[in-house]
Structure formats: structure tokens, C-alpha cells
Image: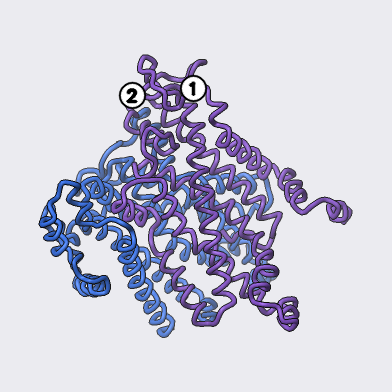
Chain colours: A blue, B purple
Amino acid sequence: MLTFITKRIGLALAIAALSVTLLFIIIHLIPGDPARTMLGPKATPELIAEIQARMGLDKTLPHQILIFFGNMLQGDLGMDIFSNRPVATIVFEQLPHTLALIFSAIAWSATLGIFLGCFSAVRRNSLADRLTGILAVSFIAAPAFVIALYSLLLFAVELKWFPAIGAGTPGDIGDIIWHLVLPSFAIGLSWVGYIARLVRASMLEILGEGHVRTARAFGLPEKWITYRYALKLAILPTVTVIGVGMGFLLSAAVFAEIVFSRPGLGKLVIDSISTRNYPVVMGSVLVSTILFVASTTLSDIVNAILDPRIRQAK
Amino acid sequence: MADTENTKTRGEFAEIIYHLVRDPLGCTGFVIVTAFVFIALFADFIVPYDPIGLNIKDRLQGPSAAHLMGTDQLGRDTLSRVMMGSRVALQVALPTIGGAMFIGILLGMIAGFGSRTVDNAIVLFFDTIRSFPTVMFALAVVALVGPSLTTVIFVIMMTSIPTYGRVVRTQTLSLRNSEFILAERSLGASVARILGVHILPNVMGPLAVLAAMDIPTVIGLEAGLSFLGMGVKPPTPSWGSILNDGYSLIRNTPWIIVAGGIPLILTTLGFTFLGEALRDVVDPKLRGTK
């Protein structure tokens, strides 16, 4: 078990290091220079040179990457040239808002998705199962930002049931949750579909397995078998999907934050792009990438702990 | 049994269409996708108004007989803009998926057929690309090169490569030691021949399904990035930029958002239904993989 966890973390570190390097290389290959982009067309060559030196852009690529890694390990993501504050501080101020949004979306969509999947599996091939299936596919297909716009239009602007803007008063839990409802609904909807289908498929597989047949032969009530034995195993794949889902939700959260004018990583990036604040953009993208790698790794490890079959297969 | 004998006489393509149309959801998907492609191709001839022609007098109207989906803040006909927008969606989806598929096939085959080191390196490369949250990655690139459709195509293509590459790799791995490949090898066939003539046709089925499922994602991403102002430049209509107009005017009129969102939801649904039905026809074993 320990070997598996060590190996998996090693792989995650390698992937994180590689993706940072790749980001650097892509930026180098793309025509355009961050310093020039930030300062605009009227900048003098001296000013550009100074900013380049401050951002370390005058050094060779491998050198830049090494310096960046060194700084990153100390929690230093560079300085924001405009406000003169550390990028890490700016990013970590916004991160909790995005995390709250993502986790609330995972929580409600997983609950409903597991319920729908289970409901479908028990009524296999019935009309209810077919309808749930179509509903699940439709949820998966609907783009999150369109759902965000439609729910903003319907529930906030027309019906005025929920607030349209912001993340609520800090400290007032009720108000914060109130502001979370619509964005969380918008980005979680497609996950209801994914999870429902996944749970249905794995539930059906498990209900056909030997140990369930044995349980039936012992005369255990069907409800007991379904919810006590089958469901426990059937939600395992969900854990993996939630890990991968983090990446999708991080992307979807960008839209939800813009549509509902919520603070968060996505809004930070968009605002920073419009002011050409390059270090902040890079810092936010890096933090979200590392977050994504960490969550897939964590879900793999949790999955291995829960299901010995996976551990042995690796 | 009689059914399979019957279909033997039909071509393979005709048979797939036949099965698709028999499935109600597949049929719905097929109709929507055909309509989408038709509108995108012939938008120039069928739009009721000039999609970028201004008519300030008739601005911000609701749906009427003259403007079925109303007009925007500059009096442009929303229906015409939505129809033209389908062209941008197709323009992005085709090169993106074609490119990603081509590179994915190439890398996937090399990984599946090459040595273990090569395989590990390519898989690590796939995992690395997949570790970027797509929209965040797109924003990082756009921040540097500025918004344009080419950037959008490049970014979505890059992030889609692993989707195709991984499937091709798995298929190649499972086929490389099958009897017909071993026989071909013992007859002295070159690696290029084995990959091109024998393995490629075997991976195309699953790839077609994957592509159909991927198109909605790509169209959604393009619209999303254009919504954020990172894609097409005004006045070119894209579903995303129409939604952006609608968003800034949300307190004046609901109709632009409603009109901009409907085609997006319909097309993504259409392609997803089509992809699902296609998967059941091409390979029932693939059920539940995505």
C-alpha cells in the first residue's frame, strides 16, 4: 500500500513539474513577450528591459525554469508588478471562493447523481430508467455557462429568488450559501448526469455478481442488498470521477464567477488578462493546475484504499 | 439473424445510418446535426437579414414576425446572427478535432507499437497535458498572444490530443500481438504497413464515436471563450459573443440570451445523442466508457 502511495505521489510530482515546464516552453515558443505585452506598445526599450530583468525574462529558458521551481518550492510565485504584492498572496486570497463553489457543486451533484443512478439501476429498463437516462445525457451535454446564464436570467433577474452578484457578506454563512446556490447549480448540473450514469452502470454490474446472488439466496431483503451491499461498492468509481472532475469544475467555475460576478480564481484571471497583469495570470493557472493534479492523485489513493483490486492491478 | 443477413447486402456506412435512424435518440441527434451542418454551410443564402447590418431604429426588440428571435442593441437580427454563429462553431470544431485526432493517432500508435520507454514517455506527455484545466490553460495562452479563433483552435486541439491518443494506444496495444498482425509480420510487412493498413481501420470506429462526443465539448468551449471575449472579434457573430451581448443587456431584454443559448444547447444535445447511438452501433462493448 505504502509503495503504491509513494509511487503515485512520485508520478504526480513528475506530472506537476512537467506541466509547469511545458507551460514555460509554450509561452517561450509563442510569439510575444510578457514584458512587452504588459507594458503595451508605447513602452520604451529601457523600461521593457527593466521589467524583463525583474521577471527574469533576460535569462536562458532552463535557467528561468530552475529559478521558478526554486521560488515555487518556497511558496513564491513572483511579484505582481502593478500592486507590488506577492502573486501567491493575491491568488490564495481568491482561492477559497473558488474552492467553496467547486466543493458545493460536487456535494449536491454527487448526492443527487448517486440517488438517480441507484434509482435507475433498481428499475432497470423501465420507462423511469429510460427517462432518467435521457435526462442524464442532456445534463452532461449542457454547457455550464449557458446553464449559468439561463439560471441568472430566470431565478435572479426575472423571479428575483436568488442574488445575481457577488459571494455574500463575509462571515454570514446563510448569505454566503444563498449566493452559492445558482453558481453551484450551474456548474454541478452536468456532474449529476455523469455520476448518475456511472453509478447506474457499476450498480448493475455489482447486482449481477456472485456475492449479491449469495445474499439473495440467504433470503436477505432486496432493499438491504441494494443499499447496504451494492451501493457501497457502486459509489467507488465516483471517487475517481470526482478527482478528474476537479479539472472540469475549475474550468466551469471561471464562467460561473464571471456570470455571477463572484470573486475567485477565474475572475482573477479574466481581470488580470484585461489589465495585462501577466504574473498573476501565470500564478493562477499554475495553482489551478497543481490543484487538479493533487485532486486526481488524492482520488486515486483513496480509491486504492477503498478497493484492494485496483491496488493489486497496478 | 435474418436481419444481419439482410444488412450484409448494404454498404457499411449505409448500415450504420440505418441503425442510427432506428434509434429514436440517434435519429433526433442525426436530424439536429444535419440541420446544424446545413445552416452552417448555407448561412449566407438563408439568413433573413444581414447578420452585421445595423438598424438602430429597431434595436432591442422582442420576438416578432419580422424578427423571429428579436434584435440586439444595434438592431441586428438575432436569428441571422445565430445562424451565422453556427459557422464559427463548425469552423472551430472541424480543424480542432481533425488536428487532435491526427496527432492523437500518430502518438497513440507510436506509444502502442514502440518500445516501453517510448510508450511511458508518451503516456506521461498525455497525462501532463491532461493536467491543465482547459479553460485556465486557454486563458494563459490568450493572455500572451491576444484573443483570436486560431488561438482557441490551437488550445482546444492541444488539450484534446490525449483523449484520442489514449484510445488509439490502448487499441494498438491490444492488437499488436493478435494473430493477424503476427501473421502479417512473419510475412515481412513493414511497421508502416501494419499500422496504416491493419491497425488504423480498427481504431477508426471508436475514434468516430469519440469525435462525435467531443464535438459538443469543443463547440461549448469555443462559445465559452468567445463569451469571455477571448475568441472571435466583433462584429463576427459567434454563439458565445451573442451570449456576451445578451449578458450585458440582461436587464434590458432576456431574448438575446435565450436566443443565443438555444442553438448551443440543441447542437450539443444533438451531437451527444448521435455519439451515443453511434457508439451502440459501432461497438456495444464501449458502453459506459465516457
Q: Which residue is mark 1?
A: B49
| CA neighbours of label 1 inside 10 A, class few (<14), some (14 to 19), many (20+) | some
B284 relative to B193, above or below: above
Report the Cα–Cα distance between label 2 and label 1.
23 Å
Q: Quadrant of residue B225?
A: top left
**Residue beneath the point at 41% across and 28% down:** B256
Residue A268 placement, left or right of B5: left
In-front residue for pair B81/A91? B81
**Residue beneath the point at 26% across and 59% down:** A282
Disc 1 is placed on an element classified as loop
Q: Amino acid at mark 2?
A: Asn
State which quarter of the image contains the C terminus of chain B: bottom right
Any part of residue B44 in sight = yes
Q: Chain ID for label 2?
A: B
Q: Which residue is mark 2?
A: B252
State which quarter of the image contains the N terminus of chain B: bottom right
Provide residue A54's location: percent of width, then percent of height: 13, 63
Any part of residue A228 in sight = no
B167 relative to A117, above or below: below
Provide residue A2's location: percent of width, then percent of height: 40, 84
